[in-house]
């Protein structure tokens, strides 16, 4: 720490992202990226002439992308007979959904109104509170890691829940979320749907009924664009206007030119999205069966990862042994997850390597 760092940040503990090592080529199953390349429509749209426009600023309103997001959700809402439509003014565009979360915490929380989150969840939430001087309230989860929404009532904090959960993959039914929204009309309920496309049900269809709902989404997990850094939030026009006031006070050109184009094309290519998410879901269900047959407990994840636990081999040990053998998984150091590893669902070929190495490790340990 330099002598110049503000005292406000003396105790700051930054988020530690999953490692991106460069020492050798790993089978990389540690940060929940898609194993597939971006859609061909994305690649084709990033033409030389678009690249030669990089001397010009990007569109600060990010309109083509916002329209593509509204169109995608309007097709879903129409299929569900939701009876309302979103407009581009309900879409808040960001440089990765972490940025949406940071802006939300900054705009709607302060020292008197903190953020409450399930105690097992996404590691960035307490960090965003820490950097902004916002009280963070971890709300205990049940012994099976499910979220007990009743414990969120009767406190003054806003609420953020990753659904499905970022560490367990468990999905909280929309009926529970709707109860939270109804019982807490003066507090925001932020639903982070980074993993929702892999089998959960989106809360977007509740947007018309509850003005205290914000849905956050990313193109990093289900749309093959983690490296382009694009995400968005969906909420009432008033909330989106508040968030834009934050964005234009910090970084008005937050989504760059190439990412704006790539993200719009990825939202439009619904066939590729459907095909790749169906493959991930099928591979995940195979992986659950395979892990159970190898003696692991697995949570009933509806995400693009599984949380696998064996009491006779620590999560850290399994993580290190797999790394030695060229497979990266995530060890989450939270106390209740010490015997677990979080494994991103990769391609079928990547998963075969993973299982081959897990079998070797169990054999070497005589298990
Ligand atoms: C990956 C992830 C994000 C961040 O995604 P980016 O758009 O890449 O910043 C946000 N929330 C959760 C729960 C995630 O797992």
Image: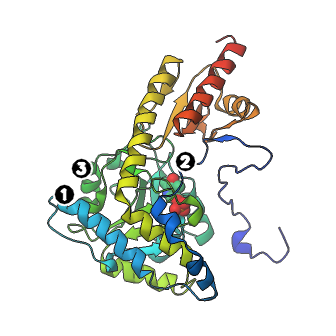
Residue at disc 2, CB closer than 8 Å to ligand 1: yes
Tag 2 secondary structure = loop
How many marks overall?
A: 3
The image's mark for residue 175 is 3
Residue 79's disc number: 1
* Residue 152 at x, y percent in the picture: 36, 53
- Give the number of the mark in front: 3 or 2: 2
Classify residue 43 as left or right of residue 161.
Answer: right
Closest to the observer: 304 or 147?
A: 304
| Residue 310 in view here | yes
Q: Position of residue 28 (x, y in %)?
A: 64, 43
The residue positioned 70% from the left and 49% from the top of the image is 19
Crowding near the residue tagged with mark 1, few <14, some 14–19, many ≥20 C-alpha atoms within 10 Å:
few
Q: Residue at x 44, y 79 (%)?
A: 243
Q: Does residue 183 sit above or below 66 in this rendering? A: above
Q: Nearer the viewer, mark 1 or mark 2?
A: 1
Which residue position holds label 2? 32
Image location (x, y in percent) of residue 252:
54, 85
| Quadrant assignment, res 366 | top right
């Amino acid at each position: 720490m330099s002598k110049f760092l503000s005292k406000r940040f003396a105790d700051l503990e930054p988020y530690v992202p999953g490692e991106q090592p460069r020492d050798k080529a790993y089978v990389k199953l540690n940060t929940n990226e898609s194993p597939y390349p971006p859609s061909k429509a994305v690649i084709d749209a990033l033409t030389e002439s678009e690249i030669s426009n990089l001397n010009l600023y990007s569109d600060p309103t990010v309109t083509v992308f916002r329209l593509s997001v509204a169109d995608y959700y309007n097709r879903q809402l129409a299929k569900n007979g939701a009876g309302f439509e979103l407009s581009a003014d309900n879409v808040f565009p960001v440089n990765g959904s972490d940025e949406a979360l940071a802006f939300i915490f900054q705009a709607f929380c302060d020292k008197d109104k903190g953020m409450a989150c399930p105690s097992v969840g996404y590691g960035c939430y307490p960090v965003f509170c820490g950097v902004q001087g916002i009280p963070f309230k971890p709300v205990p989860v049940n012994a099976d890691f499910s979220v007990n929404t009743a414990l969120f009532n009767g406190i003054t904090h806003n609420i953020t829940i990753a659904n499905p959960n970022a560490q367990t993959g468990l999905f909280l039914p929309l009926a529970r979320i709707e109860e939270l929204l109804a019982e807490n009309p003066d507090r925001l309920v932020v639903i982070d749907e980074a993993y929702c496309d892999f089998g959960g049900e989106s809360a977007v269809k509740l947007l018309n009924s509850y003005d205290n709902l914000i849905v956050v989404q990313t193109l990093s997990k289900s749309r093959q664009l983690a490296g382009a850094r694009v995400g968005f939030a969906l909420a009432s026009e008033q909330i989106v206007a508040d968030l834009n006031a934050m964005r234009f006070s910090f970084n008005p050109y937050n989504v760059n030119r190439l990412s704006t184009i790539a993200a719009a094309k990825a939202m439009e290519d619904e066939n590729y999205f459907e095909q790749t998410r169906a493959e991930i879901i099928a591979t995940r269900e195979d992986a659950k069966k395979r892990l159970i047959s190898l003696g692991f407990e697995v949570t009933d994840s509806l995400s693009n990862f599984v949380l696998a636990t064996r009491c006779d081999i620590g999560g850290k040990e399994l993580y290190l042994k797999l790394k030695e053998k060229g497979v990266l998984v995530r060890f989450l150091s939270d106390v209740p997850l010490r015997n677990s590893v979080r494994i991103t669902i990769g391609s079928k070929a990547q998963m075969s390597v993973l299982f081959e190495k897990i079998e070797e490790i169990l054999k070497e340990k005589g298990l």
